[in-house]
């Protein structure tokens, strides 16, 4: 297959011909086979071993160590509890390894080696022989997989460097126009959140050290008194203990009984003894001058707060590194030229592009090499020149909020029961699957972001002639296509429902007015805080302070619940002459008309399907109930009908912009409410 045309630069500025693609070296099928063989040491048809599933290995080891590792049998004056910083460091290293395997930063191949060395050599790291050898075997496996994958990436990258050869000019360099990609700037949201997490982690660790110093200071002037166990809570490992101060030992009660039988002070404390004391047992206590009592032999241990602070600090450092990486990988886009390859690209129906060799058949049956996920894109048109075509990465998230409680095959039945015209219309409205030639600058696994320049596809609509797509620098697996869904029938069901709506709508009707649909403002402002407050009250009433039910479960279950409720109760939608604006519980998204494929209410969700196969989905049950009983601009079916009609009937699109800007104060309120809930759960567990 010949290289893309390089007929010469177009006229600069808007109104001139589109920039031509340079004649970059082609990525042939033979070169693709060599790249695939160099990058992996196992058959490429199988799932890659160096995926995030590797995080299950240290998780399984944590479960094994929790069952087999010995714990302190008792904490008494004869055998006091002693804090073990090496043991806490070994424990944290395994938890940190799980987070790093999920985040996949650079240098990941060295993490298993460092963790294995710490577990093996740290004093008190691992004491059980089975755990020690299991840790060595598990981390040896991780090291082999990750180091092998890193060496494969380096070999494959070297092959691409040799194949690309000398740098090729960017199309805008040929056209004599400035680069459409703005200079790299740090991402303020990640920087702010990362600094807050690091500050919170440092504060927790310092709090533990301050408490330890205060505890040691009080213990120096404390006196030893006996205490009596009044009640024991076995599941939480706590007991209520009563005691009398030394000055009151000779006093008597109202009925003439010794006052020692009725304690004048009580407190609740964690008991680290094994087994736990019974009601009526005597416990030695240390009481300071402020009548504060602690169990003798149980000094304050700051390692718990240090551990709790190290985890958010690690997450914050990862966010700060991600913000710096965003700037670093984009620096190469400001140069006039870069190494490049001529490739074929094909949309995968999920918002990404599949890379294929230029001499392949270009069909969906052939195995693609890798997947490109757009961070941002810029379109060239003869009328307007370069313009930003899509939101930047971070604002281009699919809104998959709302419940999905209905099972069964109702979507498939809905599709199959329609008539032939509806099926044909839905198929025609689906995303394009044709491969087109393109030039890929930089290539994968390099120090800079990839840049793909390709001609217009049918999925882009009639507007742009060329697209420059900024993509991440790493290799993403091609995936299993848009049909791999929880409900495979969801893909055709939305266009089918939209096809019936369009068929029932007259093509020659008047243009739709610019309009908006939204939940009531008081509900949008109150829903997020009320949901977060209800979840916080539930967490408090459950009263657990364990890792699982006190921290992990409230976060893993509470955050998706909040997103679903906020998305269903605080959404907004609007249409005007430019396109569709959709605001969910946490995000805002604007889609131009040439990117909208279909819209329908399906499975109790308002779904707006884009031409690349992605969907914006919002839970619609609360809005349907409001519309049914109160009327007003809450009907999700009216939203879907208007969007589907305007997307496929250009003559009926609104001819003007909205009179009032779509203001969404609930976004800030919901983000603050979710942040407050997360801080409450972590603080309640830590303190």
Image (spheres, rainbow, N blue to C red):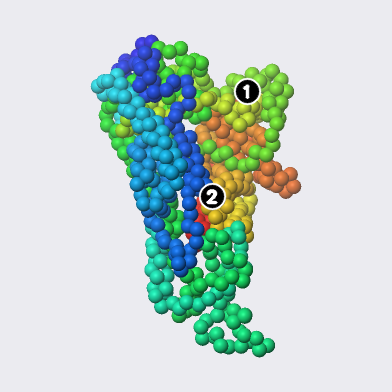
Q: Can the viewer see residue 22 in this picture?
A: no
Which of marks 1 and 2 precedes in the sequence? 1
Residue occupying the point 46% across, 68% down: 77
The location of residue 238, given as percent across then percent down, is: 57, 64
Q: Nearer the viewer, residue 84 or 107?
A: 84
Q: Can the viewer see residue 625 in this picture?
A: yes
Asked which secondary structure carries label 1, the reply is: helix
The local crowd at label 2, few if under 14, some if 14 to 19, many if 20 or more residues have their Cα within 10 Å, is some
Q: Tell me the distance, in whole angstroms, between the alpha carbons under discs 2 and 1.
A: 43 Å
Vertical position of residue 562 compared to residue 404: above or below: below
Q: Nearer the viewer, residue 597 or 676?
A: 676
The location of residue 98, given as percent across then percent down, is: 45, 42
Residue occupying the point 58% across, 88% down: 251
The location of residue 37, given as percent across then percent down, is: 38, 19
The location of residue 630, given as percent across then percent down, is: 72, 48
The local crowd at label 1, few if under 14, some if 14 to 19, many if 20 or more residues have their Cα within 10 Å, is many
Name the residue furthest top.
Answer: 1
Name the residue carrying label 1: 426
The quarter of the picture where residue 355 lies is top left
Asked which secondary structure carries label 2, the reply is: helix
Left or right, 41 with reference to 9: right
The quarter of the picture where the N terminus appears is top left
Name the residue furthest front.
Answer: 78
Q: Nearer the viewer, residue 328 or 98?
A: 98
Name the residue carrying label 2: 552
């Amino acid at each position: 297959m010949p290289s893309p045309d390089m007929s010469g630069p177009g006229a600069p500025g808007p109104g001139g011909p589109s920039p031509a693609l340079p004649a970059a070296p082609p990525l042939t099928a033979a070169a693709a086979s060599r790249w695939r063989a160099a990058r992996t040491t196992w058959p490429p048809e199988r799932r890659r071993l160096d995926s995030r599933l590797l995080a299950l290995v240290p998780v399984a080891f944590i479960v094994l160590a929790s069952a087999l590792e010995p714990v302190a049998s008792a904490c008494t004056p004869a055998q006091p509890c002693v804090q073990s910083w090496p043991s806490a460091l070994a424990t944290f290293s395994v938890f940190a390894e799980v987070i790093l395997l999920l985040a996949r930063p650079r240098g990941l191949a060295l993490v298993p080696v460092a963790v294995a060395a710490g577990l093996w050599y740290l004093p008190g790291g691992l004491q059980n022989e089975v755990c020690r050898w299991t840790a060595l075997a598990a981390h040896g496996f991780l090291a082999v997989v990750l180091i092998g994958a890193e060496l494969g990436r380096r070999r494959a990258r070297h092959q691409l460097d040799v194949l690309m050869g000398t740098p090729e000019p960017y199309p805008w360099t040929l056209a004599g126009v400035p680069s459409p990609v703005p200079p790299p700037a740090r991402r303020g949201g990640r920087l702010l959140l990362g600094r807050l997490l690091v500050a919170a982690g440092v504060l927790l660790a310092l709090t533990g050290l301050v408490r330890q110093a205060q505890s040691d200071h009080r213990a120096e002037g404390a006196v030893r008194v006996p205490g009596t166990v009044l009640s024991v809570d076995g599941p939480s490992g706590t007991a209520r203990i009563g005691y009398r101060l030394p000055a009151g030992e000779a006093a008597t009660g109202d009925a003439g009984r010794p006052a020692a039988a009725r304690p004048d002070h009580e407190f609740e404390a964690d008991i680290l003894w094994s087994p736990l004391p019974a009601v009526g047992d005597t416990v030695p206590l240390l009481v300071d001058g402020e009548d504060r009592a602690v169990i003798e032999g149980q000094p304050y241990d700051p390692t718990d707060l240090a551990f709790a602070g190290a985890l958010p600090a690690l997450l914050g450092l990862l966010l700060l590194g991600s913000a710096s990486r965003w700037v670093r990988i984009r620096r190469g886009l400001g140069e006039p030229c870069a190494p490049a390859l001529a490739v074929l690209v094909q949309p995968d129906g999920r918002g990404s592009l599949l890379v294929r060799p230029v001499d392949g058949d270009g069909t969906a049956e052939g195995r693609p090499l890798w997947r490109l996920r757009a961070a941002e894109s810029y379109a060239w048109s003869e009328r307007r020149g370069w313009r930003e075509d899509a939101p930047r990465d971070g604002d281009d998230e699919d809104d998959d909020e709302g419940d999905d409680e209905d099972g069964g095959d109702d979507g498939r039945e809905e599709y199959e029961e329609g008539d032939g015209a509806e099926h044909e219309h839905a198929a025609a409205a689906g995303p394009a699957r044709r491969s087109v030639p393109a030039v890929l600058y930089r290539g994968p696994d390099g120090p800079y972001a990839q840049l793909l320049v390709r001609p217009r596809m049918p999925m882009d609509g009639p507007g742009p002639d060329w697209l420059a797509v900024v993509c991440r620098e790493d290799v993403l697996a091609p995936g299993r296509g848009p049909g791999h869904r929880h409900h495979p029938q969801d893909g055709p069901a939305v266009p089918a429902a939209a096809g019936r709506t369009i068929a029932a709508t007259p093509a020659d009707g008047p243009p739709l007015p610019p309009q908006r649909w939204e939940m009531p403002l008081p509900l949008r402002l109150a829903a997020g805080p009320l949901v977060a407050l209800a979840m916080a009250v539930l967490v408090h009433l459950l009263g657990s302070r364990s890792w699982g039910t006190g921290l992990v479960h409230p976060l893993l279950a509470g955050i998706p619940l909040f997103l679903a409720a906020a998305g269903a109760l605080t959404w907004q939608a609007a249409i005007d002459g430019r396109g569709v604006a959709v605001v969910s519980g946490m995000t805002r998204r604007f889609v131009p008309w040439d990117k909208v494929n279909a819209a329908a209410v399906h499975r109790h969700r308002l779904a707006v399907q884009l031409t690349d196969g992605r969907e914006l989905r919002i839970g619609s049950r609360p809005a349907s109930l409001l519309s049914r009983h109160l009327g007003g601009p809450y009907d999700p079916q009216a939203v879907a009908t208007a969007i589907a009609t305007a997307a496929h009937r250009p003559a009926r699109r609104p001819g003007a912009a909205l009179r009032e800007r779509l203001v969404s104060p609930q976004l800030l309120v919901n983000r603050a409410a979710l942040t407050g809930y997360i801080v409450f759960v972590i603080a309640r567990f830590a303190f």
